[in-house]
Image (cartoon, rainbow, N blue to C red):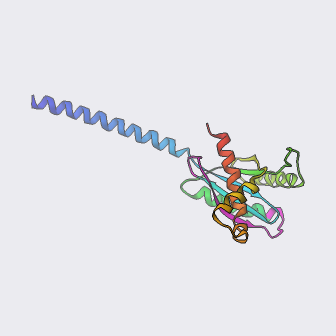
Amino acid sequence: MLRSNQRSMSKRLSLTLNVLTSLDRVDYDRYAIEVRSLGLDYGNRRIGLALSDSSGTLARPWQVLERQHSPNNEAIDQVLKSIRQLQSEEDGLGCVVVGLPTHLDGTPSEQTVQVQAFVDALRKRTEVPVSFQDERLSSYEAERLLAIRETDWRKRKSRLDAAAAAVILQDYLDTTKV
């Protein structure tokens, strides 16, 4: 009787370990495909960068790259450096989302052509997928959100571009979530 209980318990333990090992494998596979996204708010003076979490749920401001009226090639090099840095980290990088500026009625603006040229050049130099996201009113929304915490506009100004990139990226995440 004792041996029978031991065999039965041994079988249950073995079955439980197999199930747990199987679950660990499933979780690993699920997390292995979850990577971050990078949001960009491209401007003439600065490029705001935002990152999502690896689940693709939340976007947060990350950093601001100063352009100082540099040519597009230097701006692309700066962004590529950030892309490569993110790719080398454990959470990786799955895509880049660039805000596409248009007028409020949806027609292209002067900045639209510059952003499209920047993205075309960026796509030629990276294997990471690059997508557009409508950025209408993103700076306004970012300014409104920053004003809740910081009343001094001079302090908000330095973080505005990264916050706008976070708004753009969050819009993208919200519209592409399955």
Q: Quadrant of the N terminus?
A: top left
The image quadrant that residue 69 belongs to is: bottom right
Residue at the right extreme, as displayed: 110
Front position in the image: 95 or 40: 40
**Residue 116 locus on image (x, y percent):** 83, 51
Residue for point 82% across, 68% down = 70
**Magenta region: which residues?**
53-73
Front position in the image: 39 or 166: 166
Residue for point 49% across, 41% down = 29
* 20 lies left or right of 96: left
Q: Quadrant of the C terminus?
A: top right
**Residue 150 locus on image (x, y percent):** 65, 66
| Residue 19 belongs to magenta span | no
Q: Is residue 169 visible?
A: yes
**Residue 143 locus on image (x, y percent):** 72, 60
Residue for point 70% across, 67% down = 156
| Residue 72 belongs to magenta span | yes
**Residue 149 locus on image (x, y percent):** 63, 63
Residue at the left extreme, as displayed: 1
Say above or below: 151 vs 56.
Answer: below
Say above or below: 132 vs 151.
Answer: above
Say above or below: 165 vs 12.
Answer: below
Q: Is residue 123 visible?
A: no
* 69 lies left or right of 177: right
* 74 lies left or right of 3: right
Report how many numbered discs are placed on residues in the image: 0
